[in-house]
Amino acid sequence: MNVITKFLEQYSYRFPKGYPDVTNLEDKALLYKILEELNVVGEAEENADEITAEEVKNLIDQIKDDPQKLKYIKKYILKKSSEGTLNSYLTSHNVDSSTFSEYDLPEVMNNLLENSDSLEAFENYIKNPISFSSLEQSGNLVDKLSSSSNIPSDVITRIINLKGTEGGRGIGKGEVALATFIKDLKMASGKGDLDWNGKYLEVKASDARLGSRGNNPSLLTNSNLAKMYDNEENPVTPKTRLDILIHDLVEQDVNLQDIVKATKELLNQIYPDAKNIDQNITPENLTSIEKIKKALVKVYINNYANKEGVDHFIFLNTQNAFGNYISFDPNEADDLVDNGWIGTTSFQGDNLTPQLKKP
């Protein structure tokens, strides 16, 4: 009597048809339950664990003429052999399972690299990754990281686009990519975006703000600037642009020194941590809308840097010129604004923390 016949004689009564129908989910579940009771599953698993390297080689020899199957096995082996190294490297840069509340970041990173056949390239790259200084002041982050690591640009782009939250704090685009690919950067463990050898590095992507959006529109509408403005048909409202208001006052021949004084008073209320208001709000800088706007941007950046204690910035384009960046110390910001490298959307009464639009 063979094993199958013996099994059916002893257990067929437990199946509605008198035998296990493997196309029926309930029958399959019952069959596995019986096998577990007999410890057949456990023994099979134990035997499976005892497989030798020679057996694996023999199995691979059987599919040696099938490139797709060989490629699949290679990817699996590379992933398993490199998981410990990659996770250890990522952890050393504070990129771990707790980085994002929404998902397991190392797992996502591993999957991105595995699915693009980039695990081997990344493992080779992290043996000698580039330093932050090699980025220089400007360039394209996708091109720089892709050429340095031999990882396809579309994979780099996807890593740059990774974002999420951690403990209620937003982690924006670009932060993970920089922390992962730059040897002297890591995710900040406390305040700030990235840690650059103990310095606070702030990363801002397109449309980011230097501070929260909320502000009191009455700061502008109740200001001395607004009181000076004489135009009943077009009164100052929360939608009034600050640069246009100042320029219109100049055009109305309001005393220039009074405009300068009232502008400084308002900016000191809006940006109390700015230290460069006096040097930027001058009669010479109020002669055109463009100059006024640039002066406001300089004060805006300086206020945020001082308030947050930022040592260095990277502004990163994640829109029309994806990957373009400008890297600078706060004391370099004024020159970059003057040269058109940095810009924002409009300053208006209900939006005095405008979005970045350059580089």
Image (cartoon, rainbow, N blue to C red):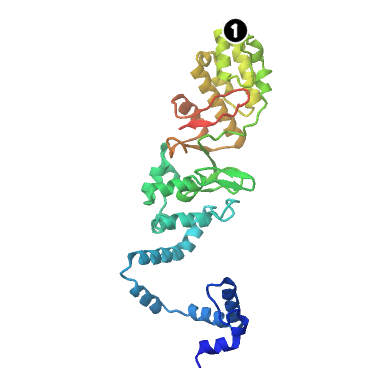
Question: For this view, does 116 lie left or right of residue 25?
Answer: left
Write the residue at 47% across / 45% down. 160
- Tell whether 61 sits left or right of 227: left
Q: Is residue 329 left or right of residue 101?
A: left
Could you say whether the residue bearing mark 1 is in a helix, strand or loop? loop
Rendered residue at 61%/17% (across/down) = 263
Residue type (three-letter) at the residue carrying disc 1? Asn
Q: Is residue 352 left or right of residue 340?
A: right
Work out whether residue 130 can be spotted: no
Depicted 79 relative to depicted 162: above or below: below
Which residue matches tag 1? 255
Residue 36 image-quadrant placement: bottom right
Residue at the image point whose x is 54% and y is 82% from the top: 43
Q: Residue lying farthest top?
A: 253
Nearer to the camera, 349 or 128: 349
Residue 327, position in %: x, y? 46, 37
For residue 223, which quarter of the picture? top right
Image quarter where the C terminus lies is top left
Q: Is residue 165 above or below residue 268?
A: below
Nearer to us in this view, 26 or 292: 26
Residue 147 % position (x, y): 36, 47
